[in-house]
Image: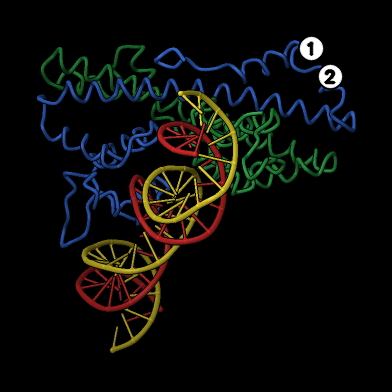
Chain colours: A green, B blue, C yellow, D red
Amino acid sequence: MYTIGKVAGMFHLPISTLRYYDKEGLFPTLERQSGIRQFSEKEIEILRVIECLKTSGLEIKEIKQFMEWTTEGSASYGKRKQLFETRKRVVEEEMRRLGKTLSMLKFKCWYYETAIADGNEDRIKNMLPDRLPPEIQKLYDSSREKFESPDGT
Amino acid sequence: MYTIGKVAGMFHLPISTLRYYDKEGLFPTLERQSGIRQFSEKEIEILRVIECLKTSGLEIKEIKQFMEWTTEGSASYGKRKQLFETRKRVVEEEMRRLGKTLSMLKFKCWYYETAIADGNEDRIKNMLPDRLPPEIQKLYDSSREKFESPDGT
DNA sequence: TATTGACCTAAAGTTAGGTTTAGGAACTAT
DNA sequence: ATAGTTCCTAAACCTAACTTTAGGTCAATA
């Protein structure tokens, strides 16, 4: 069993955040002794899931909903599986978006290195948009790729 | 030249957001004709940079600061390069975090598929924490990896 | 001519996810 | 037993990034 302060240390979270999560219903089975919260391995595992679901873009309300499902036993396996499948797709999409962002950032790093070396941007601007060095051209092009929209636009 | 409505359509942004960006100083050279904003290729390019910097986690204020640097010419090349290098590191770190999250999400998908097939979680819980099928074990372990802290904790 | 549609501003409102404050209660080491 | 640390609650506060509202201009169309 852990006190709130220990758990806060383990997860590098402020104590106030853990209290807030509790108030929002994220620890449905959290116990207390004379008013003091007793975090068990169960709550530690819940915090790992919260971290994961938050990173995947889920809101606190929706995480609460999920925690309620876990108290319903096997009846909610299907709903829980669906939730994770949706989050997986969302995170995969986000990684593609970050990959494109990273291409642009790398391109910009090269851009300013070159501008510093040249003292101006003239030579670079003459290489745009399709006469850049091959590796840089790849970054530049991939940073400007459009994403697929579900409606094909 | 584009009107605000056209640009909003091109970037799938509400018009109100473009006005807000303008008010926050993100288009330092935006021109107007009888009060109406005239977006040029320059502002289109700025919007691509805004998108990139926002995705990298930069705040509007900081993006404004960057836009001010771009009006200072070659004197600010160094600062601009540094900014992009920092954002590159931040995004690389975020991608690692998302990768770990994705491992957990994939593990959870397998978990609930298996629980649905079995009708309960008993068999899975007996495999934890280190007797999972090899591919699943990898996901499980990588989802629990701790990140390096700069201070080695 | 009048109505529609796209533009404008300033200012107030919204939302999520916390954080801070004020006033206590409860363990723990001396 | 007393001082210090850690815990508790309720409620107010905060921030970023927008969004909405209210009231208005202007150009083209029916």
In this orientation, does residue B73 appear? yes
Q: Secondary structure at mark 1?
A: loop
Q: Position of residue B80 (x, y in %)?
A: 21, 25
Q: Are marks 1 and 2 in contact (CB under 8 Å)?
A: yes
Which residue is found at the position 12% from the left and 20% from the top? A120
Please state if B112 lies on the left or on the right of D6 as rendered.
Answer: right
Which residue is found at the position 31% from the left and 51% from the top? B18
Which of the two labelled residues, at mark 1 and mark 2, occupies the earlier sequence position?
2
Residue receiving disc 2: B126
- Chain under numbered label 2: B
Query: Disc 1 versus disc 2: distance between alpha carbons?
Result: 8 Å
The circle drawn on residue A52 is: none
Please state if B19 lies on the left or on the right of A14 as rendered.
Answer: left
Q: Position of residue A3 (x, y in %)?
A: 59, 32
Which residue is found at the position 49% from the left and 41% from the top? A16
**Which of A3/B126 is in front?**
A3
Q: Quadrant of residue A20?
A: top right
Q: Position of residue B14 (x, y in %)?
A: 39, 54
Residue receiving disc 1: B131
Q: Secondary structure at mark 2?
A: helix
